[in-house]
Image (cartoon, rainbow, N blue to C red):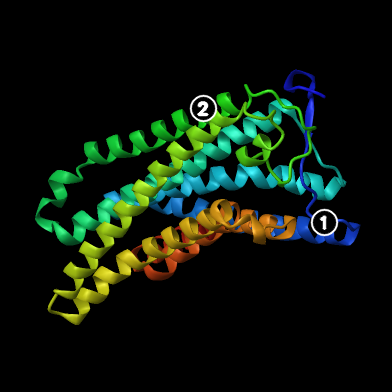
Amino acid sequence: MSNSSSIRHFLLLALADTRQLQLLHFCLLLGISLAALLGNGLIISAVAWSHHLHTPMFFFLLNLALSDLGMICTTVPKAMHNSLWDTRDISYAGCAAQLLFFMFFISAELSLLTVMCYDRYVSICKPLHYGTLLGSRACAHMAAAAWASAFLNALLHTANTFSLPLCHGNALGQFFCEIPHILKLSCSHSYFKEVGLLAFSACLGFGCFVFIVFSYVQIFRAVLRIPSEQGRHKAFSTCLPHLAVVSLFLSTGTFAYLKPSSISSPSLDLALSVLYSVVPPALNPLIYSLRNQELKAAVWRLMTGWFHKH
């Protein structure tokens, strides 16, 4: 029996068995990560450089793009390295760092999506109070609270998980370091405190979900009362991208963690983990830019200006 003090590295789940499939996975991950870097980088640059986009909605979108970049940069590079070099190793410290940053960015993502929902709610249901409820100071405080709470949550989970004695080897059933798979290596009964912490985090996440659903019920009721069709279309065009991003993120993540064990398999677990940890950061910029004319125009101006300079 080994314990955590004797473990120097973990073995991650291999994405494929054959060399051809490993190289195919490397190319797919490279394509997805480049799309995420380009899309989120363009959103961050467009919002930062376009003064007319310095509004609460785009400020929170910039923060969301930063969390998307962080999430993709935490899990994908190591998976690409392992696929390219046909290895499964990750150091003990590297695993702890990966878990810390993944929990940080995924927690920040949920917090920011909740704050963005509040922004849409105030914009449509309380437009006369928008300037006072979402002034620049209030927006900065909400963003800071989202990032700070995410960091505290990540630090708490990482410290607690890596303080547990590990008695069941060092092979993780996931392509990156994730809490449930590390808990499976833990000695019996020693992981109940972390399970309790996870349950508490799940309750907070469910609270965010309930808040988002309640807000959207109010938003859609308000939108349907708008007399002009053009006004309704404009209101929907600012809400639907956020709703699509929330649905993609929450549905894949919830199903990955709460699916019945009877349908669990390594290939299904792997596909679901890619769906909630890799796909949303690449798709979010596309979802937001497709429906938002202001953002599309700003990104286009940014790109054409860059090409003219070079």
Q: Position of residue 59 (x, y in %)?
A: 34, 47
Q: Secondary structure at mark 2?
A: helix
Whether residue 261 is visible here, answered yes or no, is yes
Q: Position of residue 187 (x, y in %)?
A: 70, 28
Q: CA distance from mark 1 to mark 2?
A: 32 Å
As drawn, the label of residue 16 is 1
Residue occupying the point 42% across, 58% down:
246
How many neighbours does mark 2 have within 10 angstroms: few (below 14), some (14-19), or many (20 or more)?
A: some
The one nearer the camera, 225 or 208, is 208
Residue that protrudes farthest toward the top in the picture: 5
Q: Secondary structure at mark 1?
A: loop
Relative vertical location of residue 257 with respect to residue 230 in this rendering, above or below = above
As drawn, the label of residue 229 is none
How many neighbours does mark 1 have within 10 angstroms: few (below 14), some (14-19), or many (20 or more)?
A: some
Whether residue 39 is visible here, answered yes or no, is no
Q: Amino acid at mark 2?
A: Leu
Residue occupying the point 90% across, 58% down:
18
Report the side of 297 relative to 172 (left or right).
left
The one nearer the camera, 34 or 240, is 240
Q: Quadrant of residue 142?
A: top left
Relative vertical location of residue 166 with respect to residue 23 in this rendering, above or below = above
Residue that protrudes farthest toward the bottom in the picture: 229
As drawn, the label of residue 155 is 2
The one nearer the camera, 128 or 294, is 128
Residue occupying the point 56% across, 25% down:
160
Q: Position of residue 176 (x, y in %)?
A: 68, 43
